[in-house]
Image: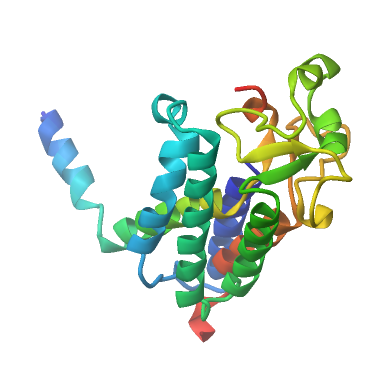
Amino acid sequence: MILLTAIIAGTIAGWGYARWKGEAWQSPVFRATWLVALGFLPQLVAFYLPYTRKSFTDEAASWCLVSSQILLLIFAGLNIRLPGMSLLALGLTCNLIVILANGGFMPLTIDAASRLVSQTVLNRLVLGERVGSASKDILLSDASTRLPWLADRFVPPQGVPYRFAFSLGDIFIALGTFWLLSSDRHNT
Amino acid sequence: MKLPINSLTLSLSKINKTHLQFALMILTLVMLVLGAGAPEDVGGVGR
């Protein structure tokens, strides 16, 4: 949701700024768009579609995640000339590195999980295993997490109704997306 | 009296190349950020 919010906010900001300047808003033009579709497909079937994801073993799902992110990173590299894309690529690289360092899934720290779900739900989760078939995350203790500062360890402050855990890479991706959409393309 | 088919044709004729490019760009970005990011929300836990 944090990432989709960045798309909506960036579009509104870019469109609003263009209107304020009396110009037509120009959306970014990507190279090799097909690569995103190809890159997202493994994640679509392994994580997002309820009917297909349950047939994937954890190992197959992690392969899908890693191969998908490599393809998306190639896409980001091909479009690095666009403003904000370098930040988005940095976030993607951070996520990919921590995923590779922790057995193919994004580590979710116990501390973040305890601030995300109730104690009852937390008790049902098993340390070292995925937190759900729809999830890219694996529950790990701080001690067993490699590169813990790149893990899903941040949680919005109390009072924010939508609860989620996110990584430093996710922050870079959200900021890069906002920058990409809100930047003035008439001067580029 | 306007036929519904005429209204539909009129509406479709207003969809131009720019609208399609915008829709494709948004779809591309949605796939990119959903694939690149790995936030975890309550809905994904235990599912």
Q: Name the residue located 79 percent from the left edge and 30 percent from the top edge.
A: A116
Q: Quadrant of residue A108?
A: top right
Up the image or down, A124 lies above or below A152; here it is above
Residue A17 appears in view? no
Up the image or down, A159 lies above or below A98; here it is above
Q: Name the residue located 63 percent from the left edge and 65 percent from the top edge.
A: A93
Q: Is residue A122 left or right of residue A75?
A: right
Residue A26 in picture, x, y percent from top left: 44, 70
Q: Name the residue located 55 percent from the left edge and 31 percent from the top edge.
A: A134
Residue A69 appears in view? yes
Frontmost residue, A8 versus A137: A137
Q: Name the residue located 65 percent from the left edge and 33 percent from the top edge.
A: A130
Q: Quadrant where the N terminus of chain A lies? A: top right
Up the image or down, A78 lies above or below B32; here it is below
User: Which residue ends up furthest to the top in the rendered image?
Assistant: A120
Q: Is residue A111 left or right of residue A67?
A: right
Q: Is residue A52 left or right of residue B37?
A: left
Q: Quadrant of residue A14?
A: bottom right
Residue A65 in picture, x, y percent from top left: 52, 48
Frontmost residue, A20 versus A128: A128
Q: Is residue A94 left or right of residue A21?
A: right
Residue A166 in picture, x, y percent from top left: 74, 46
Frontmost residue, A152 versus B34: A152
Residue A47 in picture, x, y percent from top left: 50, 36
Frontmost residue, A141 versus A49: A141
